[in-house]
Image (cartoon, grey):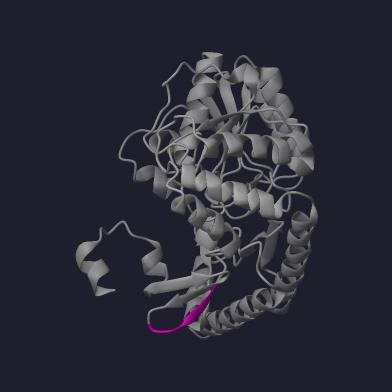
Amino acid sequence: MQALDELESNVRSYSRSFPAVFSRARGSIMLTEDGRKVVDFLSGAGTLNYGHNNHRIKGAIADYLASDAVVHGLDMATPAKIDFMELFNAVILARRNLKYCFQFTGPTGANAIEAAIKLARKVTGRQNIIAFTNGYHGMSLGAMAASGNRAYRTASGVALSGATFMPYDGYLGPDVDTADYLQKVLADESSGIDCPAAILVETVQGEGGINVAGREWLQAVQAVAKSAGALFIVDDVQMGCGRTGNFFSFEFADLSPDLVVLSKSLSGYGLPLSMVLIKKEFDAWQPGEHTGTFRGNNLALVAAMAAIDLYWRDETFGQEVLRLGEFMRHRLETIAVKYGNSFAVRGRGMAFGFDCQMPEIAAATARGAFERGLMVERCGPVDQVVKFLPALTIDCETLDHGLEIFEQALNQALKRTRSS
């Protein structure tokens, strides 16, 4: 770790939270250089839905590399790209009665968000983006302008503009319909809110604290976007690709977004891959208007095809995700009740947050968990929520073991807090 202190920038983050050198990983277990086993409930911040070094996906990658097929080709046509689009269209889109064209962007989710925002402004001729409290969409300037976290926004060093924030579902309490409020301010010519180019939403806010939007609220927001002449954009960067039990996190609400942003687990193997799904009538791009050297990496497309082929040909895998998610919910809610009813458990599928209410408890719990062999991160406005994003392929025994470690760490953190 001394080499990091001497050579790497202060901007590093996860190596501070998890101070170890990781040498190998398989499934939901990471190994450190000194031989420790760590259960991974971070999953690359949602990038490794199918676990570390999934051997079946690795086989497709190895075969592709061995064939000397094109790995980098800008956005030129390759069999890998064509095969991916055809497979994704047939297995993921057509079965859900969705019709989109594909835009491969730069390799980060933030770049795909930038593309979606830029396209919405081009289509509508407007500038304003409606975003939501506690939302997070990335660290580039356009994405950050639509993100709520004050610490991230301050670090930009410039005034962030072009977005108006509205209260997310439940932000003002259970009795306030914030979708109704949104509709009213956009319909009011004197509300001071400019007509939006787009409404950008996460169905579950990951970085914001695992805040879960309801079906009716999401449907209402989609309807508001349509009536306002704005594009409805779902950011499915972290919650897509099966995290909530369906391939898309918005399926449960029967939504039909104008644009869908995907990244993180899209490649299925941790390889960089991001894209925007665009309804054909909104594909207003001219050639080269949004570009990038590493868009549509062919190796990542091959891995993505393997993941789709392995896990999404039918509903079996998604049903197993929901089953494991209910197991997680029950265990976490039991822990919350056992250690004090001030705690709250939120989530959908296999994305959960354990709200400790106090950031020092969450910090001590996450730190203690890592010392005992569990990797979890924190989220929420002041990092008061412990976030759980285990691999969707995790076995029940490892999942239960990780939750047991979490409970032990929470218990110790509470004892230290009460004694201090």
- Identify whether 268 is placed above or below 233: below
* Side of 101 relative to 66 (left or right): right
In x, y percent, where is residue 81? 53, 36
- Identify whether 399 is placed above or below 151: below
Tell me if I can see residue 154 in this picture: yes
* Side of 227 relative to 193 (left or right): right
- Identify whether 373 is placed above or below 292: below
Res. 183 image quadrant = top right
What residue is shown at x 56% (from left), y 15% (from top)? Answer: 124
Residue in the foreground of this view, choosing between 44 and 294: 294
- Identify whether 23 is placed above or below 92: below
- Give the extent of the magenta segment: 34-39
What residue is shown at x 78% (from left), y 44% (from top)? Answer: 252
In x, y percent, where is residue 246? 73, 49
Tell me if I can see residue 166 in this picture: no
Residue sitting farthest toward the left: 6
**119 in the magenta segment:** no
Res. 185 image quadrant = top right
Residue sitting farthest toward the front: 67
Residue in the foreground of this view, choosing between 125 and 188: 125
In x, y percent, where is residue 89? 68, 35
Residue in the foreground of this view, choosing between 148 and 106: 106
What residue is shown at x 74% (from left), y 38% (from top)? Answer: 217
Count of marks, rendered view? 0
Picture quarter with the N terminus: bottom left
In x, y percent, where is residue 9? 25, 58
* Side of 129 relative to 33 (left or right): right
